[in-house]
Image (spheres, rainbow, N blue to C red):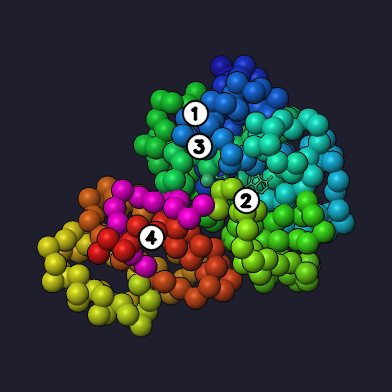
Amino acid sequence: MDSPIQKAVKILKTGGVVAFPTETVYGLGASISNSKAIQKIYQIKGRPFDNPLIVHIGSPALLYKIADVIPDAALKLIEKFWPGPLTIVLKKSALVSDAITAGLPSVAIRMPSHPLALKLLKTFGEPIAAPSANRSGRPSPTTYQEVVQELGNKVDMILDGGKSEFGLESTVIDLSTSAPRLLRPGFITYEEVRKFLPHLKLRKENGSGPLPSPGLRQAHYQPNCVVKLVSTAQWKDALNKFLKKNLRLGLISFSQTIPENRKIVFLKDFSNNKALFAAGLYSSLIEAEKCKVDLLLVESVEKKGIGRAIMDRLERASSNGNEY
Ligand code: TXA
Ligand code: MG
């Protein structure tokens, strides 16, 4: 009988889609050389066609097939951070179709470190295009069960690799031009990458203009409840105010002591630990929605280190937070 990996490889080879675990979040994968399967990914996710996919590889050698120019800066980052939660954007080769890059001349590439993802990639032997395994605009799944709930029978197979270690999508760095830019903050922090790339710029340092990465739209990662970001300084006042209203409240706390109250129907406390906050954030958003929370108050953290990635996701998850 086929092992789950062998079964997944057969599905990929015949144009199917397979959800698989990575150390960041679960991905929804298809072979980069099967345009129908790539289309299926967009359909299943309800993803706008102008938002390109990340190409996953199981060995750095495949980089030379899918990227056209590989600058020294890329080699430096790869040596330090691959396999792991870092995606680099490079000029694409002719092998990568416009459907994958949404017509951009560049392609996003990453080599994940999750053992099951690596095994799948190595056994398949070819690159796999994979966005996060959520429907467009929703929090990304970080467990097998969450993928089942999110995509269920729409996909051909879901590989179970337990809980994703980091819980937030990979750091994305654009090296396709002469000015390296951080497009999406992640577990590998801006501060850390800057040690290797001193000229790395943050997105906003480049001013306004068109989005450098289409996936950076404002509203994203939203559960089916209103999310409101509250600073540590305003937390007590905000909580008192909302406890007086007739609402099912959810709380995600970083540093607070929470009073008992029947109106609080969901509570998650990350006890001053940013790595735990990052790893548990999406699952908490999904759990709050299951508890039928009306309003979810989330304590903000400093935008430094992993805090930058946490706040990036929270600012977008809470872009409906002014309803209350
Ligand atoms: O951790 C991750 O990166 C996960 C796992 C499954 O590997 N994948 C993931 O994929 O987060 P997705 O599709 O949800 O996010 C891909 C991000 C989007 O923000 C997209 O706009 C950006 O990468 N991206 C992809 N190709 C790009 C390109 N050529 N130039 C700029 N940004 C690009
Ligand atoms: Mg995504």
Image point (68%, 51%), residue name? 87
Q: Position of residue 263 (x, y in %)?
A: 15, 64
* Label 3, residues with CA under 10 Å away: few <14, some 14-19, many ≥20: some
Distance Cα–Cα, label 2 vs label 1: 20 Å
C-alpha gap between disc 2 and disc 3: 14 Å
Do residues under tags 4 and 1 come within 8 Å of each other at their CB atoms? no
Which amino acid, by three-letter code, is at mark 4?
Ser
The three-letter code of the residue at mark 3 reads Arg
Mark 2 residue's CB less than 8 Å from ligand 1: yes
Q: Is residue 170 above or below residue 272?
A: above
Residue type pointed to by label 2: Ser
Q: Badge 2 is on which residue?
A: 213
Of callouts 2 and 4, the N-terminal one: 2
Mark 3 and ligand 1: say if the CB distance to the nearest ligand atom is below 8 Å: yes
Label whose residue precedes the other's in the sequence (2 or 1): 1
Res. 232 image quadrant: bottom left
Q: Earlier in the sequence, mark 4 or mark 1?
A: 1
Q: Quadrant of the N terminus?
A: top right
- Residue 228: say if magenta: yes
